[in-house]
Image (cartoon, rainbow, N blue to C red):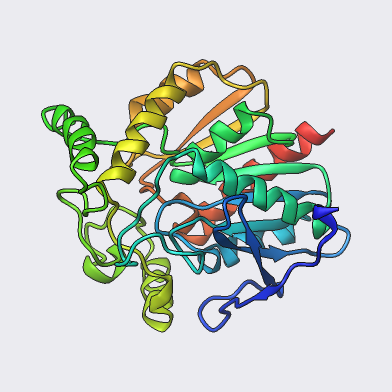
Amino acid sequence: MLDAAPLELAPLFTDVCPAPLEGVAHWVNASDGVRLRVGVWKPEAARGTVLLFPGRTEYIEKYAPTAGDLATRGFATISIDWRGQGLADRLMDDSRVGHVGSFSDYQRDVSAMIRAARVLEMPKPWFLLGHSMGGCIGLRAVMEGLPIAAAAFTGPMWGIRIAPHLRPLAWTLGRIMPAIGHGQRLAPGTKIDPYPLLEPFEGNMLTTDPKNWDMMGDQLRAHPELGLGGPSVTWLHEALEETTALAVRSAPDVPCITFLGSNERIVHVPRIHERMEGWKNGILEIVENGEHEVLMEDAETRNQIVDMMTARFQKAAG
C-alpha cells in the first residue's frame, strides 16, 4: 500500500527557537511529483493531532514554538512546507518569487500531508489550524472532506486586502500577464526579499512582539534557503479567483473558531466577518491590538489563543 511506504528523513533546523519537544521532518511527494516537507511533533499519549497549515512565505520551523504550546496541552502537530516555499521544491528559476500554477495544486499538497499523517500514525482525532494562506487552503480542504473534528483559523486569507481603486487593475493584470507569458513576474508593489529582513519592527504588519519579530529574522538569516519574497502575478490572480469562489459557498458543518487581530492589515477583514457570521457552530474572536500573525504575539496572548483553540478542539472531540 502507498500509505505504508516509509518516509525519508528531511532536515529540520533547530538552532533558532526550537520547540521544547523534539521534532522530526520528512520528505513527501505530491501526486504530480513535487517534493514537499512535513514536520512532526508527537508527545506521548497525545489526545489528537493538529494539522497545521502555514501561510504564504512560511516554513515548518516558524511554528515549532506553537507545536510546543500544543504539546503541553496534549496535542501532536504535523505541519507542511507548501510547494514553492520552505524546503519544498521551488517552482521558479528565481526561488525568491512565490508562485503556484493553480491554487488547486495546494490540495495535492494537502493530500500528500494526509498520506504522511497516516504513515506516521498521527493520533486521532485530527484538527485543523490554518493561518493566512493556509486558512484559504484549509477552508477548501474542509469543504471537500478533510477528515477533521474541528477547525481553527488565524488571520485567514478568505480575501486579499487591496485598495478598492486598485482591485480592477489586479484582476486585469492577472488575466493579461499570464496570457502574454509574464505570469511568473513579481506582482506589482511587492518585493523580492523576505518581509522580516526588509522592514523595521516599528510599524510592521505581522506582530507587536519584538522577540518574535527578531526570531523570524534570525531564522531567515541563519537559513536563507527558507526565505521567500513577494508573489508572482499568477499566484495573485489564482488567490483572487480562489477566495472569490470560496466566498459564495456555504460554511462546512464543522465546529470552528477563528482569531482575527484588531489591527489586521494584510487579509480582507470583511470577508472574515461575513464567513463567520454564516458559520453555524463557529466563533470569531478578536485579538485586541493584534496584527496579522496572532500566534507570533506576546506569550500571554498566544497562551490565551491556544487555550481557547484547544478547548474548542476538546469539546468537538467529546
Q: Residue at x 33, y 32 (%)?
A: 240
**In this rendering, is residue 28 above or below 51?**
below
Looking at the image, which residue sits at the far front?
Answer: 180
**In this rendering, is residue 42 above or below 75?**
below
Looking at the image, which residue sits at the far right?
Answer: 45
Q: Residue at x 67, y 27 (%)?
A: 255
Q: Position of residue 10 (x, y in %)?
A: 63, 75
Q: Residue at x 61, y 51 (%)?
A: 52
Left or right of residue 143, residue 194 in this image:
left
Left or right of residue 184, residue 209 in this image:
right
Q: How many marks?
A: 0
Q: Position of residue 55 (x, y in %)?
A: 45, 51
Q: Which quadrant: the C terminus?
A: top right
- Of 261 and 25, which appears nearest the observer? 25
- Of 289 and 103, which appears nearest the observer? 103
Q: Position of residue 253 (x, y in %)?
A: 67, 20
Q: Residue at x 69, y 44 (%)?
A: 310
Q: Quadrant of residue 71?
A: bottom right
